[in-house]
Image (cartoon, rainbow, N blue to C red):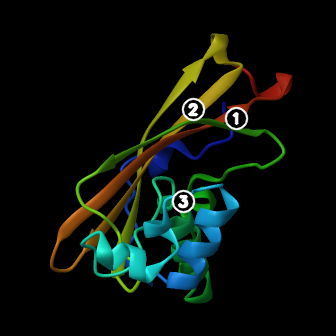
Amino acid sequence: MGIFDRNTAGHETAPIDVTVERGAVAFFAETIGETNPIHFDADAARAAGHPDVVTPATYPVVIEMAAAKIGKRNGVPDTQDVIKVDNRYVLHGSESYTYHGPIYAGDTVEVISRVKSFADAKGGALEIANLELEIRHPERGVLAVAERTLIHRLPKEKQG
């Protein structure tokens, strides 16, 4: 028996609205060492044909954290709470992003988290949660989908 609540496979959160803030995008871009000014300078972004600064490639994780905070303030558990992550044993597995359109500062986007599936590995020593995050704009549709895995290293007494 594992730690993840496998009965949550298929769970989907209600959409949570997050407004993408220019200052937060610029701070994140500078923090990760981004040098393209379209990610932190509104004038440079506009000169490149964008309406405002463009979020860097890994920014959906920031949007996900913002949605989780908003949800918790409104009494809605985040996906990690839903699947019963035990942070003493959890590892970050993989993460990938599929982009369908840019995300701009000033956008208010809907964030939906899904529990896709669960799997075991290493003869039951590891259990894997496959999660998905969808970020969509009311007019421009789906902008990004992030897929990631979380891995529990199971203590011996919980293995297979």
- Disc 2 vs disc 1: Cβ atoms closer than 8 Å? yes
Instruction: Judge whether residue 15 can be spotted in this image.
Output: no
Q: Position of residue 85 (x, y in %)?
A: 68, 50
Q: Quadrant of residue 61?
A: bottom right
Instruction: Say which residue appears at 57% left-offset and 74% top-offset.
Output: 26
Image quadrant in which the C terminus is located: top right
> What amino acid is at disc 1?
His
Q: Give the total number of marks visible in the rendering.
A: 3
Assign a secondary structure to mark 3. helix
Image quadrant in which the N terminus is located: top right
Residue tagged 1 = 152
Who is closer to the viewer here, 82 or 36? 36
- Please tell me whether residue 40 is drawn above or below residue 61 in the rendered image: below
Instruction: Judge whether residue 73 can be spotted in this image.
Output: yes
Distance Cα–Cα, label 1 vs label 3: 20 Å
Residue mark closest to the camera, 3 vs 2: 3
> What amino acid is at disc 2?
Ile
